[in-house]
Amino acid sequence: MADAPVTLSAHVVSQQALLPPEHAPGVATIVGRIGRVAAVIAQEMAHAALRDRLGYVGGVNASGDEVKKLDVWSHDTLLAGLRATGACAAFVSEESPEPIEIPEAGGRRGLVVCCDPVDGSSNLDVNGAVGTIFALRPSGGSTPAAPAALGPGTDQIAAGYVMYGPATAFVYTVGHGTHGFSLNPETGEFLLTHPDIRTPRRGKTYGINEGNFNSWHPGQRAFVEHLRTPDKATRRPYSLRYSGAMVADVHRTLLDGGLFMYPADCSDPARPKPKLRLLYEVAPMAFLVEQAGGRASTGTGRVLELVAKEYHQRAAVILGSADDVATAEEFYRR
Ligand code: FDP
């Protein structure tokens, strides 16, 4: 008889022994809860057009993006789920200018959850893939708890994302490999379908918004020119793949290799302007990619060593196959 499939909750419990004892129960509870909330969000996404959930609410979020109905609903639903865990001491969300403190879950074991409830929300109204990204950091028992999240990405205890696509995928790490699950919509359970994901050392695709070509750092422009230049020996040109949702682009890159890049706008070289948010987009993805054997760089340094000074800080990112990212870094050095 075939083995019973491993559920997300069972898998998270099995990872507890690998975690620092004071954080193991909290991580298991929160990751399991995000999985349950994600199944509810997936349902809501599937019915969004039928329930008048598409479109904008009016107003902009902490990052200046126009807010959509599903952004707000997903933020509220995740927050309610996290409050109920008793393990989440603060919630840093793209949809809230200030972190939300949850003092009931304070103490040394409390965790700060950094989250982008709906990543790639410009895809919502065209039925494209979108996601949820999260990272867990220790609060260290500080009050308020959220400032403890301001630190290097190496502080992250766990990170993951949900991708709402043709199937709903849940991918997470607690620092011992990156593991992928698929939602069984009949039961609402995530089942292990991609254990210990390994990203190939080189890939065949690159994902980047090429419309911004003229505003990039010269090293970034030269690197993309290189990827586009035919050379049989190094299997170039690479193919361009870009969905407009970081989660979908990183998911493809994790599984198939290649690159996902969002470099800074360097129109004013003295003031580079990155787009993606460090705490709840770039750092969690960097953690997942490194745990799958890949690499995540700003072009000039390791993403996980970037120290967050603000909750909604932005950072440039080049991530994916280790050797491809190393080549990108060479172009930045030239
Ligand atoms: P979005 O603004 O739609 O939420 O989170 C930022 C993000 O999407 C990423 O998911 C995506 O990779 C990127 O921005 C897309 O930006 P561009 O439209 O500038 O390409």
Image (spheres, rainbow, N blue to C red):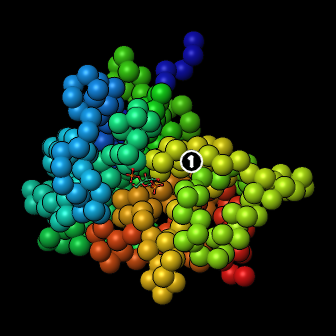
Instruction: Tell me what residue is drawn at x 56 percent, y 38 percent.
Output: 195
* Ligand 1 quadrant assignment: bottom left
Instruction: Tell me what residue is drawn at x 30 percent, y 67 percent.
Output: 312
Q: Amino acid at mark 1?
A: Tyr
Residue 62: image x %, image y %?
24, 63
Q: Residue furthest bottom?
A: 270
Residue marked by disc 1? 242
Q: Residue furthest top?
A: 1
Residue 243: image x %, image y %?
52, 44
Along the horizontal axis of the image, is 203 left or right of 304? right
Along the horizontal axis of the image, is 30 left or right of 297? left
Q: How many marks?
A: 1
Q: Is residue 123 above or below residue 42?
A: below
Quadrant of image for the C terminus? bottom right
Question: Can residue 268 be seen in this snapshot?
Answer: yes
Residue 303: image x %, image y %?
51, 70
Q: Residue furthest left?
A: 104
Residue 14: image x %, image y %?
43, 41
Cβ of disc 1 within 8 Å of ligand 1?
A: yes
From the viewer's side, name the closer residue of 300 and 295. 300
Instruction: Tell me what residue is drawn at x 45 percent, y 37 percent.
Output: 129
Instruction: Tell me what residue is drawn at x 83 percent, y 51 percent.
Output: 235
Quadrant of image for the N terminus? top right
Question: Can residue 302 be seen in this snapshot?
Answer: no
Q: Residue furthest right?
A: 233
Give the class, few, some or many, for how many residues have Cα within 10 Å of label 1's Cα (few <14, many ≥20).
some
Q: Is residue 32 above or below residue 107?
A: above
From the viewer's side, name the closer residue of 212 and 208. 212
From the viewer's side, name the closer residue of 21 and 62. 62
Q: Determine which quarter of the picture holds residue 65.
A: bottom left
Q: Determine which quarter of the picture holds residue 234.
A: bottom right
Asked which secondary structure carries label 1, the reply is: loop
